[in-house]
Image (cartoon, rainbow, N blue to C red):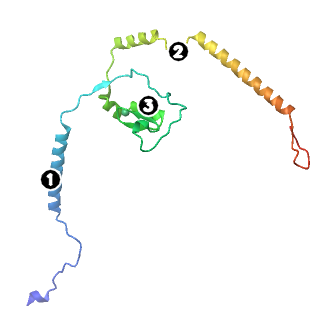
């Protein structure tokens, strides 16, 4: 018989064969499900208030120089670093804490978006007036500035004078090392 003489192709590859069409179908279904799920979870877009400027003082220094015992099991608010009550997290230093409270995650927790309302000309002028009138302890006039410079120069002079005197004292004194067989003089 002819069929028995002609060599038949035998599948000797042991690799798994993939039915590409089946997998394509599965992928389509998965994408459909994911799209539906994201539609459900998104819901109506949340309207957040525009960004506002801070109206409170950020306390960065009150715990400066203080000693505190820290244990890893203590609540977050008693851990080392800056604790954010709003987000319930601890930030390790003041720079990062400022970044955090100015950041998106924190502002979102406060119900604000990162968008800023466009101010009108009147609002800007008003703000300038408020700032002009407000005399905070940090601000100073030109006279204050002159006074400050004069004081600083005086302080510098005094510091230099003290250093000169110390040097003189050092030169005048000497120490004798009596335990050695020779006597050393250190000037
Ligand atoms: Zn926060």
Q: Residues within 10 Å of mark 2 (few under 14, many from 20)?
A: few
Q: Quadrant of residue 129?
A: top left
Task: Work out which quarter of the rendered image holds the N terminus and state it.
Answer: bottom left
Q: Which mark is residue 58?
A: none
Circle 2 — which element? loop
Percent coordinates x, y for residue 117 in the rendering: 31, 22
Q: Residues within 10 Å of mark 1 (few under 14, many from 20)?
A: few
Percent coordinates x, y for residue 147 in the rendering: 63, 12
Tag 1 residue = 29
Tag 3 residue = 98
Percent coordinates x, y for residue 15 in the rendering: 24, 72
Q: Which is more toward the observer, 23 or 181? A: 181
Residue at point 42%, 33% (across, down): 99
Label 1 beta carbon within 8 A of ligand 1: no
Task: Work out which quarter of the rendered image holds the C terminus and state it.
Answer: top right
Q: Quadrant of residue 152?
A: top right
Q: Of callouts 3 and 1, which one flags the residue occurring earlier in the amino acid sequence? A: 1
Tag 2 residue = 139
Horizontal side of residue 125 vs 167, given as left or right:
left
Q: Of callouts 2 and 1, which one flags the residue occurring earlier in the amino acid sequence? A: 1
Number of numbered callouts drawn: 3
Q: Which is more toward the observer, 149 or 55? A: 55
Circle 3 — which element? helix
Label 3 beta carbon within 8 A of ligand 1: no
Q: Are marks 2 and 3 in contact (CB under 8 Å)?
A: no
Horizontal side of residue 100 vs 31, given as left or right:
right
């Amino acid at each position: 018989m002819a069929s028995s003489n002609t060599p038949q192709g035998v599948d000797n590859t042991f690799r798994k064969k993939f039915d590409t069409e089946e997998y394509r179908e599965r992928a389509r279904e998965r994408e459909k499900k994911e799209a539906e799920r994201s539609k459900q979870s998104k819901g109506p877009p949340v309207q957040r208030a525009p960004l506002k400027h801070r109206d409170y003082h950020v306390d960065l220094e009150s715990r400066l120089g203080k000693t505190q015992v820290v244990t890893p099991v203590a609540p977050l608010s008693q851990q080392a670093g800056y604790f954010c009550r709003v987000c319930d997290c601890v930030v390790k230093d003041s720079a990062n804490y400022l970044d955090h409270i100015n950041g998106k995650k924190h502002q979102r927790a406060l119900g604000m978006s990162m968008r800023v309302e466009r101010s009108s000309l009147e609002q800007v002028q008003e703000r300038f007036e408020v700032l002009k009138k407000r005399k905070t302890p940090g601000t100073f006039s030109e006279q204050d500035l002159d006074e400050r410079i004069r004081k600083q120069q005086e302080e510098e002079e005094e510091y230099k004078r003290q250093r000169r005197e110390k040097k003189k004292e050092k030169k005048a004194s000497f120490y004798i090392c009596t335990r050695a067989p020779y006597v050393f003089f250190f000037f």
